[in-house]
Image (cartoon, rainbow, N blue to C red):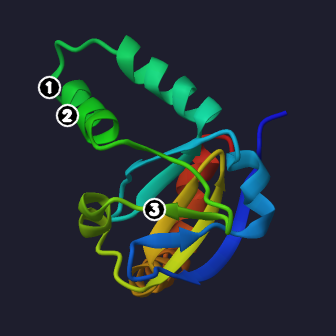
Amino acid sequence: MAAMFIGEYFHNLDDKGRLAIPKKFRAALAKGAVVTRGLDDCLFLYTMAEWKVLAEKLASLPFSQANTRAFARLMLAGAMDVALDKQGRVVLPEYLRGYAGLKKEITVAGLYNRLELWDTRKWSDYTIRTESARNEIAEQLGELGI
């Protein structure tokens, strides 16, 4: 069964760019993981199995379309294999930390098949905006049958 990531966790990035992964997620990531550029100024962290599914989908898209190429480049070219160390930490490459503006305080947000890694201030701003628009969002999702 695939891992299910849910919840919000708050951790600090150390001086070497290492982030402690919440203990409840470590077993799912023990066989390897991939971190890449995400959307909304965060990073996405996938199990190796989930990453392979996503990468195969991206590779199967028609590369003749500019938006497809751009999205595939964003996700694939920026990706990096990461492994948990004995303390349950992963090293986040400097170029990815810069992309997401990760400095010290990090929010690890579980989103079912991936973890999102956010600068805590950006996460707070994002959730405030989203919570204030919750009724409009719910209405739009209702149109999709959710």
Residue 143 vs 77, above or below: the answer is below
Which residue, given by chain and number where applicable, does mark 3 sit on?
Answer: 91
Q: Are marks 3 and 2 in contact (CB under 8 Å)?
A: no
The local secondary structure at tag 2 comes to helix
Query: Residue 3 at x, y = what percent?
Result: 77, 44
Which residue, given by chain and number where applicable, does mark 2 sit on?
Answer: 70
Q: How far apart are marks 3 and 2 (CA)?
A: 26 Å
Indicate the amino acid at tag 3. Answer: Val
Q: Are marks 2 and 1 in contact (CB under 8 Å)?
A: yes
Indicate the amino acid at tag 2. Answer: Ala
Residue 62 vs 117, above or below: the answer is above
Indicate which disc, 1 or 3, sits on the residue closer to the N terminus: 1
Which residue, given by chain and number where applicable, does mark 1 sit on?
Answer: 66
> In which quadrant of the rendered view does residue 80 lie?
top left
Query: Residue 137 at x, y = what percent?
Result: 53, 62
> In which quadrant of the rendered view does residue 14 lie?
bottom left
> In which quadrant of the rendered view does residue 111 lie?
bottom right
Q: Viewer-proximal residue, 14 or 138?
A: 14
